[in-house]
Amino acid sequence: MAGLKYMSGFGNEFSSEDPRCPGSLPEGQNNPQVCPYGLYAEQLSGSAFTCPRSSNKRSWLYRILPSVRHKPFTRMSCGDLTENWNEVEPDPNQLRWKPFNIPKSSEKKVDFVSGLHTVCGAGDSKSRNGIAIHMYSCNTSMTDKCFQNADGDFLIVPQQGEILITTEFGKMMVEPNEICVIQQGMRFSVDVFGETRGYILEVFGAHFELPDLGPIGANGLANPRDFQTPVAWYEDRTIATGYTIVNKYQGKLFSCQQDFSPFNVVAWHGNYAPYKYNLENFMVINCVAFDHADPSIFTVLTAKSTRPGVAIADFVIFPPRWGVADHTFRPPYYHRNCMSEFMGLIKGHYEAKEEGFQPGGGSLHSIMTPHGPDVDCFEKNSTALLKPERVAEGTMAFMFESSFSMAVTKWGLETCQRLDKNYYKCWEALKSHFNPNWKPSSK
Protein backbone atom coordinates (compact mmCIF):
# COMPACT_ATOMS: atom_id res chain seq x y z
CA MET A 1 0.00 0.00 0.00
CA ALA A 2 1.47 3.31 -1.06
CA GLY A 3 2.58 5.50 1.80
CA LEU A 4 3.05 2.80 4.42
CA LYS A 5 6.44 2.89 6.10
CA TYR A 6 8.27 0.30 8.16
CA MET A 7 11.29 -0.05 10.40
CA SER A 8 13.82 -2.76 9.63
CA GLY A 9 15.08 -5.51 11.93
CA PHE A 10 14.01 -8.47 14.06
CA GLY A 11 13.51 -7.94 17.80
CA ASN A 12 15.11 -4.51 17.72
CA GLU A 13 14.61 -1.72 20.22
CA PHE A 14 12.37 0.51 18.12
CA SER A 15 11.02 3.99 18.77
CA SER A 16 8.41 5.70 16.64
CA GLU A 17 6.29 8.84 16.69
CA ASP A 18 3.42 9.76 14.42
CA PRO A 19 4.89 12.74 12.48
CA ARG A 20 1.78 14.77 13.28
CA CYS A 21 2.97 14.94 16.91
CA PRO A 22 6.74 15.51 16.99
CA GLY A 23 8.29 15.07 20.43
CA SER A 24 5.50 12.81 21.66
CA LEU A 25 7.96 10.27 23.09
CA PRO A 26 9.04 11.26 26.62
CA GLU A 27 12.73 12.02 26.91
CA GLY A 28 14.89 10.04 29.31
CA GLN A 29 12.12 8.10 31.05
CA ASN A 30 9.13 5.88 30.35
CA ASN A 31 6.51 7.20 32.76
CA PRO A 32 6.72 10.96 33.41
CA GLN A 33 4.25 12.64 35.70
CA VAL A 34 2.77 14.37 32.66
CA CYS A 35 3.39 12.93 29.19
CA PRO A 36 3.87 15.13 26.11
CA TYR A 37 0.63 16.22 24.45
CA GLY A 38 -1.29 15.06 27.55
CA LEU A 39 -0.98 11.40 26.54
CA TYR A 40 -1.33 8.37 28.79
CA ALA A 41 1.65 6.01 29.27
CA GLU A 42 0.81 2.30 29.05
CA GLN A 43 3.22 -0.62 29.06
CA LEU A 44 2.50 -3.80 27.10
CA SER A 45 4.55 -6.68 28.53
CA GLY A 46 5.20 -9.75 26.40
CA SER A 47 7.33 -11.47 29.04
CA ALA A 48 7.71 -11.60 32.79
CA PHE A 49 9.38 -8.51 34.22
CA THR A 50 12.28 -10.64 35.46
CA CYS A 51 13.09 -12.49 32.21
CA PRO A 52 16.75 -12.27 31.18
CA ARG A 53 17.45 -9.18 29.12
CA SER A 54 17.88 -11.29 25.97
CA SER A 55 14.31 -12.56 26.20
CA ASN A 56 12.61 -9.61 27.92
CA LYS A 57 9.81 -8.26 25.73
CA ARG A 58 7.94 -5.04 26.39
CA SER A 59 6.88 -1.80 24.74
CA TRP A 60 5.67 1.53 26.05
CA LEU A 61 2.64 3.04 24.29
CA TYR A 62 1.68 6.72 24.55
CA ARG A 63 -1.99 6.97 23.81
CA ILE A 64 -4.87 9.43 23.85
CA LEU A 65 -6.92 7.24 26.20
CA PRO A 66 -5.75 4.10 28.04
CA SER A 67 -7.10 0.73 26.97
CA VAL A 68 -8.53 0.15 30.47
CA ARG A 69 -11.48 2.45 29.68
CA HIS A 70 -14.09 0.00 28.43
CA LYS A 71 -17.35 -1.65 29.48
CA PRO A 72 -17.18 -5.18 31.00
CA PHE A 73 -16.36 -8.16 28.79
CA THR A 74 -19.18 -10.58 28.05
CA ARG A 75 -19.16 -14.01 26.37
CA MET A 76 -19.81 -14.18 22.64
CA SER A 77 -20.14 -17.03 20.16
CA CYS A 78 -16.84 -18.67 19.22
CA GLY A 79 -18.16 -20.00 15.93
CA ASP A 80 -15.65 -22.57 14.67
CA LEU A 81 -12.83 -21.28 16.87
CA THR A 82 -12.05 -23.80 19.59
CA GLU A 83 -9.50 -25.18 22.03
CA ASN A 84 -11.46 -28.38 22.63
CA TRP A 85 -9.17 -31.16 21.41
CA ASN A 86 -11.57 -33.93 22.45
CA GLU A 87 -14.53 -33.22 20.18
CA VAL A 88 -13.87 -36.31 18.06
CA GLU A 89 -11.86 -39.50 18.41
CA PRO A 90 -8.14 -39.33 17.54
CA ASP A 91 -7.28 -40.05 13.91
CA PRO A 92 -3.69 -41.13 13.10
CA ASN A 93 -4.30 -41.33 9.34
CA GLN A 94 -2.62 -39.14 6.78
CA LEU A 95 -5.08 -36.29 6.27
CA ARG A 96 -5.38 -33.92 3.35
CA TRP A 97 -7.85 -31.11 2.76
CA LYS A 98 -9.04 -29.68 -0.53
CA PRO A 99 -8.92 -25.86 -0.68
CA PHE A 100 -11.01 -24.49 2.15
CA ASN A 101 -14.15 -22.63 1.11
CA ILE A 102 -14.37 -18.85 1.11
CA PRO A 103 -17.87 -17.45 1.75
CA LYS A 104 -19.38 -15.38 -1.06
CA SER A 105 -20.02 -11.79 -0.02
CA SER A 106 -23.29 -11.90 -1.93
CA GLU A 107 -24.48 -14.66 0.40
CA LYS A 108 -23.06 -13.67 3.79
CA LYS A 109 -20.77 -10.97 5.11
CA VAL A 110 -17.90 -12.58 7.02
CA ASP A 111 -15.02 -10.67 8.55
CA PHE A 112 -11.67 -11.94 9.84
CA VAL A 113 -12.92 -12.82 13.34
CA SER A 114 -16.12 -14.58 12.28
CA GLY A 115 -14.13 -16.33 9.53
CA LEU A 116 -11.74 -18.10 11.92
CA HIS A 117 -11.88 -21.92 11.89
CA THR A 118 -9.70 -24.18 14.03
CA VAL A 119 -8.33 -27.19 12.15
CA CYS A 120 -6.18 -28.86 14.80
CA GLY A 121 -4.08 -28.24 17.87
CA ALA A 122 -2.89 -29.45 21.26
CA GLY A 123 -2.02 -28.17 24.71
CA ASP A 124 -3.68 -25.56 26.83
CA SER A 125 -3.76 -21.79 26.82
CA LYS A 126 -4.42 -21.76 30.58
CA SER A 127 -1.13 -23.48 31.35
CA ARG A 128 0.57 -21.46 28.59
CA ASN A 129 1.87 -24.44 26.64
CA GLY A 130 0.37 -25.40 23.31
CA ILE A 131 -0.42 -24.75 19.69
CA ALA A 132 -3.42 -24.30 17.40
CA ILE A 133 -3.75 -24.13 13.63
CA HIS A 134 -6.57 -22.09 12.15
CA MET A 135 -7.84 -21.13 8.72
CA TYR A 136 -9.32 -17.71 8.08
CA SER A 137 -11.71 -17.16 5.18
CA CYS A 138 -13.56 -13.87 4.89
CA ASN A 139 -14.93 -11.31 2.46
CA THR A 140 -15.60 -8.20 4.55
CA SER A 141 -13.44 -5.75 6.46
CA MET A 142 -13.76 -5.37 10.21
CA THR A 143 -15.72 -2.20 10.96
CA ASP A 144 -15.40 -0.49 14.34
CA LYS A 145 -14.08 -3.77 15.72
CA CYS A 146 -10.67 -5.11 16.68
CA PHE A 147 -9.29 -8.42 17.91
CA GLN A 148 -6.95 -9.19 20.79
CA ASN A 149 -5.47 -12.62 21.48
CA ALA A 150 -4.73 -12.95 25.20
CA ASP A 151 -3.76 -16.61 24.70
CA GLY A 152 -0.78 -16.42 22.38
CA ASP A 153 0.91 -15.23 19.20
CA PHE A 154 -0.65 -15.39 15.73
CA LEU A 155 1.60 -16.14 12.75
CA ILE A 156 -0.58 -15.25 9.76
CA VAL A 157 0.09 -16.67 6.28
CA PRO A 158 -2.13 -15.05 3.62
CA GLN A 159 -2.90 -17.37 0.69
CA GLN A 160 -5.49 -15.44 -1.32
CA GLY A 161 -5.99 -11.70 -1.07
CA GLU A 162 -3.91 -9.05 0.62
CA ILE A 163 -4.85 -7.89 4.09
CA LEU A 164 -4.38 -4.44 5.60
CA ILE A 165 -3.75 -4.87 9.31
CA THR A 166 -4.18 -1.85 11.56
CA THR A 167 -2.48 -2.33 14.93
CA GLU A 168 -1.85 -0.20 17.98
CA PHE A 169 1.70 0.18 16.62
CA GLY A 170 0.77 1.21 13.07
CA LYS A 171 -0.41 -0.29 9.79
CA MET A 172 0.91 -3.24 7.75
CA MET A 173 -0.11 -4.44 4.31
CA VAL A 174 0.51 -8.19 4.07
CA GLU A 175 0.22 -9.96 0.71
CA PRO A 176 0.33 -13.64 -0.26
CA ASN A 177 3.95 -14.85 -0.05
CA GLU A 178 4.43 -12.58 2.97
CA ILE A 179 3.75 -13.46 6.60
CA CYS A 180 3.12 -11.40 9.69
CA VAL A 181 3.23 -12.03 13.42
CA ILE A 182 0.80 -10.35 15.82
CA GLN A 183 2.11 -11.09 19.28
CA GLN A 184 0.07 -11.85 22.38
CA GLY A 185 -2.17 -9.03 23.59
CA MET A 186 -1.74 -6.71 20.59
CA ARG A 187 -4.99 -5.30 19.25
CA PHE A 188 -5.53 -5.31 15.51
CA SER A 189 -8.19 -4.95 12.83
CA VAL A 190 -8.17 -6.53 9.37
CA ASP A 191 -9.33 -4.90 6.13
CA VAL A 192 -9.81 -7.11 3.06
CA PHE A 193 -10.37 -6.30 -0.60
CA GLY A 194 -12.41 -9.26 -1.78
CA GLU A 195 -12.59 -12.96 -1.05
CA THR A 196 -9.67 -13.69 1.27
CA ARG A 197 -8.13 -16.84 2.75
CA GLY A 198 -5.07 -17.84 4.74
CA TYR A 199 -3.52 -19.94 7.47
CA ILE A 200 -2.72 -19.10 11.11
CA LEU A 201 -0.26 -20.77 13.45
CA GLU A 202 -0.98 -19.90 17.09
CA VAL A 203 1.44 -20.66 19.91
CA PHE A 204 0.75 -20.41 23.63
CA GLY A 205 3.53 -19.62 26.07
CA ALA A 206 6.39 -18.73 23.73
CA HIS A 207 7.23 -16.08 21.15
CA PHE A 208 8.62 -16.68 17.70
CA GLU A 209 12.32 -16.09 17.21
CA LEU A 210 14.92 -16.66 14.53
CA PRO A 211 16.46 -20.15 14.65
CA ASP A 212 20.06 -20.52 15.74
CA LEU A 213 22.36 -20.94 12.74
CA GLY A 214 25.10 -23.11 14.27
CA PRO A 215 27.67 -24.21 11.65
CA ILE A 216 25.88 -22.15 8.98
CA GLY A 217 27.53 -19.12 10.57
CA ALA A 218 26.36 -15.56 11.02
CA ASN A 219 24.26 -15.17 7.87
CA GLY A 220 21.56 -17.03 5.99
CA LEU A 221 17.98 -18.26 6.13
CA ALA A 222 15.74 -15.34 7.21
CA ASN A 223 18.00 -12.34 7.74
CA PRO A 224 16.98 -9.98 10.56
CA ARG A 225 17.17 -6.88 8.37
CA ASP A 226 14.32 -8.16 6.16
CA PHE A 227 11.70 -8.11 8.93
CA GLN A 228 9.54 -4.98 8.95
CA THR A 229 7.74 -3.33 11.86
CA PRO A 230 5.14 -0.58 11.32
CA VAL A 231 5.68 3.04 12.30
CA ALA A 232 3.37 4.84 14.71
CA TRP A 233 0.00 5.95 13.38
CA TYR A 234 -2.98 7.11 15.38
CA GLU A 235 -6.60 8.06 14.96
CA ASP A 236 -8.43 10.27 17.47
CA ARG A 237 -11.93 9.04 16.75
CA THR A 238 -15.06 8.84 18.88
CA ILE A 239 -17.62 6.18 17.96
CA ALA A 240 -20.98 7.07 19.48
CA THR A 241 -22.49 3.73 18.44
CA GLY A 242 -19.68 1.85 20.16
CA TYR A 243 -16.37 0.23 19.21
CA THR A 244 -16.13 -3.54 19.82
CA ILE A 245 -13.05 -5.18 21.34
CA VAL A 246 -13.04 -8.96 20.77
CA ASN A 247 -10.81 -10.77 23.25
CA LYS A 248 -9.70 -14.38 22.86
CA TYR A 249 -9.15 -15.57 26.42
CA GLN A 250 -8.63 -19.17 27.59
CA GLY A 251 -9.81 -20.40 24.21
CA LYS A 252 -13.13 -18.52 24.33
CA LEU A 253 -14.25 -15.24 22.78
CA PHE A 254 -15.43 -12.24 24.79
CA SER A 255 -16.39 -8.75 23.66
CA CYS A 256 -16.64 -5.35 25.23
CA GLN A 257 -17.66 -1.88 24.12
CA GLN A 258 -15.93 1.47 24.29
CA ASP A 259 -16.64 4.78 22.60
CA PHE A 260 -13.21 5.46 21.07
CA SER A 261 -10.80 3.85 18.65
CA PRO A 262 -8.12 1.64 20.26
CA PHE A 263 -5.69 2.76 17.55
CA ASN A 264 -4.97 5.99 19.42
CA VAL A 265 -1.26 5.38 20.08
CA VAL A 266 0.61 8.53 19.09
CA ALA A 267 4.07 7.17 19.88
CA TRP A 268 5.70 3.99 21.14
CA HIS A 269 9.06 2.46 21.90
CA GLY A 270 10.27 -1.02 22.82
CA ASN A 271 11.05 -4.46 21.41
CA TYR A 272 7.58 -6.01 21.56
CA ALA A 273 5.79 -5.18 18.32
CA PRO A 274 4.07 -6.76 15.31
CA TYR A 275 6.15 -7.48 12.22
CA LYS A 276 5.99 -8.85 8.71
CA TYR A 277 8.38 -10.69 6.37
CA ASN A 278 8.53 -11.39 2.63
CA LEU A 279 9.28 -15.07 2.01
CA GLU A 280 11.10 -14.19 -1.23
CA ASN A 281 13.90 -12.79 0.94
CA PHE A 282 14.71 -16.19 2.46
CA MET A 283 18.35 -17.11 1.78
CA VAL A 284 18.17 -20.83 1.01
CA ILE A 285 20.79 -23.26 2.34
CA ASN A 286 20.73 -26.58 0.52
CA CYS A 287 22.62 -29.77 -0.31
CA VAL A 288 25.29 -29.36 -3.01
CA ALA A 289 26.92 -32.82 -3.06
CA PHE A 290 24.73 -35.84 -2.21
CA ASP A 291 21.87 -36.98 0.01
CA HIS A 292 18.97 -34.92 1.28
CA ALA A 293 19.33 -32.30 4.00
CA ASP A 294 16.68 -32.25 6.71
CA PRO A 295 13.87 -29.69 6.22
CA SER A 296 15.02 -27.84 9.35
CA ILE A 297 17.37 -25.91 7.04
CA PHE A 298 14.27 -24.14 5.72
CA THR A 299 13.11 -22.83 9.13
CA VAL A 300 12.01 -19.19 9.03
CA LEU A 301 10.84 -18.79 12.64
CA THR A 302 10.75 -21.03 15.69
CA ALA A 303 8.91 -20.97 19.01
CA LYS A 304 11.17 -22.88 21.38
CA SER A 305 10.11 -25.23 24.13
CA THR A 306 12.03 -25.69 27.38
CA ARG A 307 13.84 -28.67 25.84
CA PRO A 308 16.92 -27.65 23.83
CA GLY A 309 16.43 -28.16 20.11
CA VAL A 310 12.73 -29.07 20.44
CA ALA A 311 10.18 -26.53 19.26
CA ILE A 312 6.61 -25.89 20.31
CA ALA A 313 6.31 -24.90 16.67
CA ASP A 314 8.53 -24.21 13.67
CA PHE A 315 7.48 -22.31 10.57
CA VAL A 316 9.28 -23.91 7.62
CA ILE A 317 9.06 -23.05 3.91
CA PHE A 318 10.00 -24.86 0.69
CA PRO A 319 10.99 -22.00 -1.61
CA PRO A 320 12.30 -21.96 -5.19
CA ARG A 321 15.91 -23.19 -5.28
CA TRP A 322 18.43 -25.24 -7.23
CA GLY A 323 18.62 -29.03 -6.93
CA VAL A 324 22.12 -30.31 -7.71
CA ALA A 325 22.72 -33.38 -5.52
CA ASP A 326 24.39 -36.36 -7.23
CA HIS A 327 23.51 -40.04 -6.58
CA THR A 328 20.43 -38.85 -4.70
CA PHE A 329 16.66 -39.19 -4.70
CA ARG A 330 16.06 -35.46 -4.57
CA PRO A 331 12.44 -34.99 -3.42
CA PRO A 332 11.51 -35.48 0.24
CA TYR A 333 12.21 -39.00 1.45
CA TYR A 334 9.76 -41.42 3.06
CA HIS A 335 9.53 -40.57 6.69
CA ARG A 336 8.06 -41.19 10.13
CA ASN A 337 8.56 -38.36 12.56
CA CYS A 338 8.26 -37.69 16.30
CA MET A 339 6.85 -34.27 15.33
CA SER A 340 3.45 -33.31 13.86
CA GLU A 341 3.59 -31.81 10.37
CA PHE A 342 0.82 -29.58 8.99
CA MET A 343 1.51 -28.39 5.45
CA GLY A 344 -0.11 -25.64 3.41
CA LEU A 345 0.39 -24.29 -0.08
CA ILE A 346 0.36 -20.60 -0.94
CA LYS A 347 0.84 -21.02 -4.70
CA GLY A 348 2.07 -23.45 -7.33
CA HIS A 349 2.58 -27.22 -7.10
CA TYR A 350 4.42 -28.97 -4.27
CA GLU A 351 7.25 -31.12 -5.65
CA ALA A 352 6.40 -34.34 -3.77
CA LYS A 353 2.67 -34.28 -4.63
CA GLU A 354 1.94 -32.30 -7.76
CA GLU A 355 -1.64 -33.55 -7.88
CA GLY A 356 -4.20 -33.25 -5.12
CA PHE A 357 -2.30 -30.87 -2.84
CA GLN A 358 -3.68 -27.48 -3.84
CA PRO A 359 -3.24 -23.83 -2.84
CA GLY A 360 -5.57 -23.01 0.03
CA GLY A 361 -5.72 -26.64 1.16
CA GLY A 362 -3.60 -28.49 3.69
CA SER A 363 -2.34 -31.80 4.99
CA LEU A 364 -1.57 -33.23 8.42
CA HIS A 365 0.91 -36.04 9.02
CA SER A 366 0.66 -36.86 12.68
CA ILE A 367 3.35 -38.14 15.02
CA MET A 368 4.88 -41.38 13.67
CA THR A 369 2.41 -41.57 10.77
CA PRO A 370 4.38 -42.50 7.62
CA HIS A 371 4.37 -40.12 4.68
CA GLY A 372 6.41 -39.19 1.63
CA PRO A 373 6.28 -38.72 -2.14
CA ASP A 374 3.39 -40.16 -4.14
CA VAL A 375 3.82 -42.88 -6.77
CA ASP A 376 4.37 -40.57 -9.73
CA CYS A 377 6.98 -38.55 -7.86
CA PHE A 378 8.88 -41.66 -6.76
CA GLU A 379 8.92 -43.34 -10.17
CA LYS A 380 9.84 -40.15 -12.02
CA ASN A 381 12.66 -39.15 -9.70
CA SER A 382 14.11 -42.64 -9.29
CA THR A 383 15.10 -42.62 -12.98
CA ALA A 384 15.57 -38.90 -13.62
CA LEU A 385 18.79 -37.58 -15.13
CA LEU A 386 20.50 -35.84 -12.22
CA LYS A 387 21.38 -32.53 -13.78
CA PRO A 388 21.13 -29.14 -12.05
CA GLU A 389 17.50 -28.05 -12.07
CA ARG A 390 15.27 -25.41 -10.59
CA VAL A 391 13.04 -26.85 -7.86
CA ALA A 392 9.70 -25.38 -6.80
CA GLU A 393 9.82 -22.53 -9.32
CA GLY A 394 6.65 -20.45 -8.95
CA THR A 395 5.72 -22.39 -5.81
CA MET A 396 5.62 -21.70 -2.09
CA ALA A 397 4.71 -24.55 0.23
CA PHE A 398 5.17 -24.31 3.98
CA MET A 399 4.99 -26.45 7.10
CA PHE A 400 3.85 -25.82 10.65
CA GLU A 401 5.84 -28.43 12.58
CA SER A 402 5.27 -29.09 16.28
CA SER A 403 6.46 -31.38 19.04
CA PHE A 404 2.81 -31.58 20.19
CA SER A 405 0.62 -34.45 19.08
CA MET A 406 -2.16 -32.47 17.48
CA ALA A 407 -5.84 -33.38 17.54
CA VAL A 408 -8.11 -32.50 14.65
CA THR A 409 -11.33 -30.63 15.40
CA LYS A 410 -14.81 -31.67 14.41
CA TRP A 411 -14.80 -28.76 11.97
CA GLY A 412 -11.62 -30.08 10.36
CA LEU A 413 -12.79 -33.69 10.10
CA GLU A 414 -16.47 -33.18 9.34
CA THR A 415 -18.05 -29.73 9.27
CA CYS A 416 -15.83 -28.11 6.63
CA GLN A 417 -16.50 -31.00 4.23
CA ARG A 418 -13.11 -30.46 2.57
CA LEU A 419 -11.34 -33.61 3.78
CA ASP A 420 -9.95 -35.64 0.87
CA LYS A 421 -10.95 -39.18 1.79
CA ASN A 422 -8.97 -40.61 -1.12
CA TYR A 423 -5.63 -39.19 0.02
CA TYR A 424 -4.26 -42.62 0.97
CA LYS A 425 -4.64 -43.79 -2.62
CA CYS A 426 -1.70 -41.69 -3.81
CA TRP A 427 0.59 -44.38 -2.30
CA GLU A 428 -1.42 -47.50 -3.13
CA ALA A 429 0.31 -48.13 -6.47
CA LEU A 430 3.79 -48.19 -4.95
CA LYS A 431 5.24 -51.52 -5.95
CA SER A 432 8.18 -53.64 -4.85
CA HIS A 433 11.41 -53.19 -6.79
CA PHE A 434 13.21 -55.77 -4.66
CA ASN A 435 15.62 -58.04 -6.58
CA PRO A 436 17.24 -60.76 -4.43
CA ASN A 437 19.76 -61.43 -7.22
CA TRP A 438 21.02 -57.87 -7.37
CA LYS A 439 24.79 -57.47 -7.49
CA PRO A 440 26.80 -54.27 -7.25
CA SER A 441 28.07 -53.11 -10.60
CA SER A 442 31.78 -53.62 -11.19
CA LYS A 443 33.80 -50.43 -11.48
Image: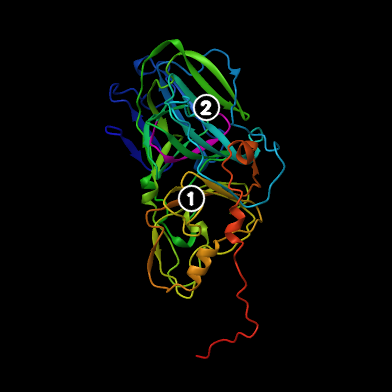
Where is mark 1, residue-wise? 398
Q: Callout 1: few (<14), some (14-19), or many (20+) C-alpha neighbours within 10 Å?
A: many
Q: Callout 2: few (<14), some (14-19), or many (20+) C-alpha neighbours within 10 Å?
A: some
Q: Secondary structure at mark 2?
A: loop
Left or right of 157: which side holds 25? left
Is 161 within the magenta? yes
- Which SS type dominates the magenta stretch? strand
User: What is the distance, in whole Å, between disc 1 and disc 2 at their CAs?
Assistant: 25 Å
Residue plotted at (28% across, 22% down): 20
**Residue 437 location, x and y as percent?**
63, 86
Scheme of image coloration: rainbow
Tell me where residue 17 sits by quadrant. top left
Amino acid under disc 1 = Phe
**Please, is residue 376 above or below residue 40 in the view?**
below
Magenta stretch bounds: 149-164
Q: Secondary structure at mark 1?
A: strand
For the N terminus, the image quarter is: top left
Amino acid under disc 2 = Ser
Where is mark 2, residue-wise? 114
> Which numbered disc covers residue 59?
none
Residue 256 appears in the figure: yes
